[in-house]
Image: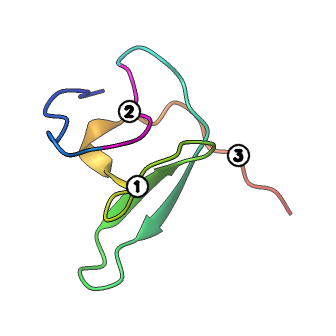
Amino acid sequence: MNDAQRPADYVGDWPEAGRVYPVRVLPHVRSGQPQVHVLGFYAERPYGAFAAHRFERVADVWLN
């Protein structure tokens, strides 16, 4: 995972390399590119989602 390049004005939780997080992956409204929302993380606007390239998928869980 890439945990570098935290924006200077970012206020909120930031993921750390080597940790496993529960996430939800949703498409960006305008671009359609996947964005990662870390469940339980807090971030002030305009942030709240991370680029998919910052994470490595280790498991998929589908709940019905």
CB contact under 8 Å: marks 1 and 2: no
Which residue type does callout 1 highlight?
Glu
Q: Residues within 10 Å of mark 2 (few under 14, many from 20)?
A: some
Among numbered discs 3 and 1, the one appearing first in the sequence: 1
The residue at 40%/55% (across/down) is 44
Residue 42 placement, left or right of 44: right
* Residue annotated with mark 2: 14
Among numbered discs 2 and 3, the one appearing first in the sequence: 2
Pair 1/2: label in front? 1
Give how far across and how far down residue 10 sits, in percent: 26, 44
Name the quadrant containing residue 7. top left
Magenta residue span: 11-16
* Residue annotated with mark 1: 44
Within the magenta stretch, is there residue 13? yes
Name the quadrant containing residue 4. top left
Pair 2/3: label in front? 2
The N terminus is located in which quarter? top left
Residue 18 placement, left or right of 41: left
The residue at 81%/56% (across/down) is 63
Asked which secondary structure carries label 2, the reply is loop
Asked which secondary structure carries label 3, the reply is loop
Which residue type does callout 3 highlight?
Val
* Residue annotated with mark 3: 61
Residue 14 placement, left or right of 8: right
| Above-or-below relation of 50 to 46 | above
